[in-house]
Amino acid sequence: MRNFVATKIQELRPSGIRKYFDIAATMDDVVTLGIGEPNFVTPNHIMDAGIDSMRRGETGYTANAGLIELRRAISDYVHRLYRLNYDPKTEVLVTVGVSEGLWLALKAVVEPGDEVLVVEPCFVSNAAAVEMVGGVPVPVHTSVEHEFQVTSEALEQVITPRTKAILISYPNNPTGAVLTCEHMQQVAAIAEKYDLVVISDEIYERLVYGIDHINFATLPGMYERTIVLSGMSKAFAMTGWRIGYVTAPHYLMEAIFKLHQYLIMSAPTMGQRAALEALEHGEDDVQHMQSQYDRRRKLIVDGFNQIGLTCFEPRGAFYAFPDIRVTGMTDEEFCERLLLDARVAVVPGSAFGASGAGFIRASYANSDENIERALERMHRFMLQHG
């Protein structure tokens, strides 16, 4: 019998994150700094809104694009934060998380063989998503020496006549970097010069520290060529509710919505009701959680620097990205030995692209106690391994 699995899928590299979680799941007393989700429970009033919707019998589909009340709330929210105006009927789409939104955005603009510039390090699914829609992911490297900021020079070096889009993810997973206005303007200039579309994953937009987040579509000339992805998972501690959203100009949203129609009936109804409550009444929750992350950010970064793992200051998301090259190990060797010897789970930076090699990702979306326990164990590990 022939192999029925598509060649493209056979060639797709498995996620570099799963290996260490699978090992950790078989062990006792592991402190995990690998999980990329809030350790907060969804705030009660948001949970109640979802529960109440089910008790009212709202267990069927909503409109395909999402509840119009929620789309209006998203439009108002984006306007309140960034003074951008998206028509809730034609330029806002509720999706099953940012994961669906990313696939829709790529599928809507990428022809087979088109190249997409993928700024690295980045979330493990970004390059894979490009491949799954038939495109060719082209890595654009960033470095700790430049605080993982992408530059126009780096983009221009890899542009070809096949380049169609730029995929950026700031605030960044895994590094915690936030793209400065100057570097955003460089990306915008390249997009305009070579007539490219920009797909900007801004799921961590509300988790920034000491600076303001800039929505990429606010830059001059970028509204018409930018698809922005965001959602409820990170800032509102709603990962399991699976509510994301896409904002884009009408001509792009038409294509995105067409794909969504055939792929998804609608995002979860109770999740949409909860998201509506979050956007309308959840700002205090966001501020509280953001302040807690900020405190933990300082705790973990200071801790890494004190034990000899140099860590640049992350300004967004909830990840630290320390440099482990001083140990003489690769990042994969370091993570495996740290897990087996010290029972601390982190993720190798190379799982997020070649630019991440020699680093590890550690999430500080965790309790102070667990962060301190992990740092103590890592300190002992560093002493044992020179």
Image: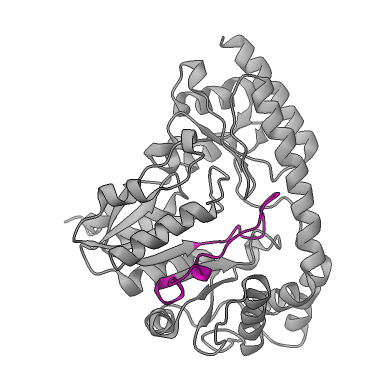
Residue 259 lies in the magenta stretch = no
Residue shown at the point (52%, 65%) measured from the top left: 98
Q: Indicate the quadrant containing the N terminus: top left, top right, bottom left or bottom right.
A: bottom left
Residue 165 pos. (x, y %): 33, 63
Instruction: Name the residue nearer the viewer: 316 or 106.
Output: 316
Residue 316 pos. (x, y %): 62, 49
Main SS, magenta residues: loop
Instruction: Name the residue nearer the viewer: 253 or 177.
Output: 177
Q: Is residue 371 above or below residue 162?
A: above
Q: Quadrant of residue 185?
A: bottom left
Residue shown at the point (63%, 62%) measured from the top left: 233
Residue 142 pos. (x, y %): 42, 41
Residue 221 pos. (x, y %): 43, 72
Residue 208 lies in the magenta stretch = yes
Instruction: Name the residue nearer the viewer: 88 or 30.
Output: 88
Residue bounds of the magenta highlight: 201-226
